[in-house]
């Protein structure tokens, strides 16, 4: 990054007393784009009044080996909101003047990151699937555009910090430590003008889905039109000991819940194998399965783009193939 020192800030979201993996993924990307040894990589953490200090201290000790400095903002509130995160990030930016700020595109990150960008009148690109660095323009933010069929490279060279939210699971974890430890900065905070008071937070009971960690995933594409067709693939996933995933058109059509969506706006998979039934092969979907070790696609259209992007392509009716596997009359 040239001869000047560049500060790169990475927001580290906490869930169940753990740093969410997307934070480590962003640190790995920050280390990749920072080729200058004098650049600084900062981690930013926001904590409520009640947290498990013992568990998090171990987390901070580990993540500190990848960082130059770790900024921990502790608030005297039981529950955190977007206001707390915005307040902490704004103070960090004002004092540390980072050139780049990276935030995970989680529900929390998506909610407060645009507010931070608006406060500093700078640009932000949401749901990036890749980021790069250019000596002239700085951060290059890559995300699907135009119906998610092309990848757009977006730059914001005239305002700082250059900000991006990045989809969880699309980048690699850091491979090596930078230091034995980092400088720790702890800031006690309180919101002066609080607009929202959270009295109680209820945990929503949802269907337990293990798409992110599944070894085998069966993915329903937009050729799946009826509930009974999706049930075939659901049964196949169970028979194979895997999980059922769905592309965005299937979710938008109401056949599958959002919790099973695979792609830029859904899960990013790291499975050993993914079986794609009637999937067209949009960039939106491919971004979510790029880390899968083996891709197998079944599509009756010999010219379908998905067949050029997978390890094994089968030109056949997806339903017949699925039923054949279920009946143990054939397989791969």
Image (tube, rainbow, N blue to C red):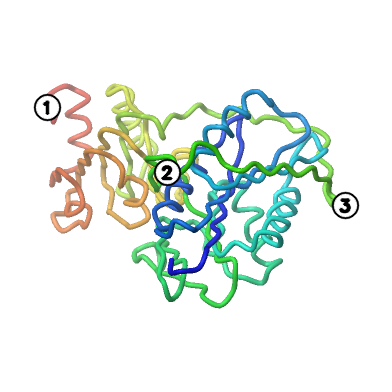
Q: Nearer the viewer, residue 95 or 209?
A: 95
Q: Can you name the residue that lies furthest to the right here?
A: 192
Label 3: how many Cα within 10 Å (few below 14, some 14–19, many 20+): few
Q: Earlier in the sequence, mark 3 or mark 2?
A: 2
**Secondary structure category for the residue under label 2:** loop
The residue identified by callout 2 is: 169
The residue identified by callout 1 is: 330
Mark 2, mark 1: which one is toward the viewer?
2
Query: Which quadrant is home to the N terminus?
Result: bottom left
The label number, if any, that marks residue 198 in the structure image: none
The residue identified by callout 3 is: 192
Q: Nearer the viewer, residue 143 or 247?
A: 143
**Secondary structure category for the residue under label 1:** loop
- On screen, residue 117 versus residue 193, left or right, reads left
Q: CA distance from mark 2 to mark 1?
A: 33 Å
Query: Which quadrant is home to the C terminus?
Result: top left
**Secondary structure category for the residue under label 3:** loop
Could you say which quadrant of the image residue 98 lies in?
Answer: bottom right
Q: Earlier in the sequence, mark 3 or mark 1?
A: 3
Give the residue displayed 43% in from the left and 60% down from the top: 36
Give the residue displayed 71% in from the left and 49% down from the top: 82
Q: Earlier in the sequence, mark 2 or mark 1?
A: 2
Q: CA distance from mark 3 to mark 1?
A: 66 Å
Q: Nearer the viewer, residue 325 or 191?
A: 191
Q: CA distance from mark 3 to mark 2?
A: 36 Å
């Amino acid at each position: 990054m040239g001869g000047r020192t560049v500060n790169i800030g990475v927001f580290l979201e906490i869930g169940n007393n753990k740093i969410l993996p997307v934070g480590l993924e962003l640190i790995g990307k920050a280390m990749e784009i920072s080729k200058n040894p004098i650049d600084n990589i900062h981690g930013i953490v926001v904590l409520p009044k009640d947290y498990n200090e013992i568990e998090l201290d171990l987390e901070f000790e580990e993540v500190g080996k990848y960082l130059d400095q770790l900024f921990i903002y502790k608030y005297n509130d039981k529950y955190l909101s977007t206001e707390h995160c915005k307040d902490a990030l704004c103070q960090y930016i004002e004092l540390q003047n980072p050139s780049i700020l990276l935030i995970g595109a989680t529900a929390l990150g998506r909610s407060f990151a645009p507010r931070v960008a608006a406060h500093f009148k700078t640009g932000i690109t949401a749901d990036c699937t890749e980021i790069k660095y250019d000596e002239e323009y700085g951060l290059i933010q890559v995300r699907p555009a135009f119906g998610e069929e092309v990848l757009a490279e977006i730059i914001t060279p005239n305002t700082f910090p250059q900000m991006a939210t990045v989809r969880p699971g699309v980048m690699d974890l850091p491979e090596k430590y930078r230091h034995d430890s980092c400088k720790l900065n702890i800031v006690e905070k309180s919101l002066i003008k609080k607009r929202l008071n959270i009295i109680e937070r209820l945990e929503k009971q949802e269907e337990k889905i293990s798409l992110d960690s599944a070894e085998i995933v069966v993915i329903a594409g937009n050729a799946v039109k009826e509930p009974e067709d999706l049930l075939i693939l659901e049964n196949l996933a169970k028979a194979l000991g895997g999980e059922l995933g769905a592309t965005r058109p299937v979710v938008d059509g109401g056949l599958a819940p959002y919790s099973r969506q695979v792609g830029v706006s859904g899960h990013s998979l790291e499975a050993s194998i993914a079986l794609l039934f009637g999937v067209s092969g949009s960039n939106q979907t491919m971004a979510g399965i790029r880390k899968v070790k083996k891709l197998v696609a079944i599509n009756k259209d010999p010219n379908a783009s998905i067949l050029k992007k997978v390890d094994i392509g089968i030109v056949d009716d997806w339903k017949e193939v699925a039923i054949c596997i279920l009946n143990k009359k054939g397989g791969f």
